[in-house]
Amino acid sequence: NTDSDGELRHTYIKGRPDVNCQVLILKRLPPEISWRELSEEFGLPIPTLSSFYQRQCLPRLRSFAKLEGLL
């Protein structure tokens, strides 16, 4: 399990536990879903999703990849 401690699932946009890092990372991996589609799916502006992903999700993904020896 790649998120055994639940960190990715528990890191989410305020008030929207359904929009968490685990969900966004999986949707942005190839074949990636566009920010426009994600914006429509979640009813959130693209900048909100994109900045949350850059600030909260990517650093956690990088840390995980380093721990696993992938980077």
Image (spheres, rainbow, N blue to C red):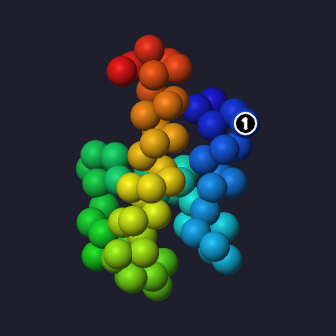
| Residue 62 position within the rendered picture, expressed as x and y whole percent measured from the top left | 43, 34
Position of the N terminus by quadrant: top right
- Quick one: quadrant of the C terminus? top left
Q: Nearer the viewer, residue 6 or 66?
A: 66
- Element carrying mark 1: loop
Q: How many marks?
A: 1
Q: Left or right: where does residue 49 sit relative to residue 4? A: left
Q: Position of residue 22 (x, y in %)?
A: 54, 50
Image vertical order of residue 16 relative to residue 10, above or below: below
Residue drawn at (34%, 76%) of the image: 46
Query: Quadrant of the rendered structure where residue 27 is?
Result: bottom left
Q: Residue at 63% of width from left, 55% of height from top?
A: 11
Residue at the outermost front position: 55
Report x, y in % for residue 66: 45, 22
**Front residue of this view, candidates 29 and 52:** 52
Q: Which amino acid type is shown beneath numbered disc 1?
A: Asp
Name the residue that disc number 1 marks: 5
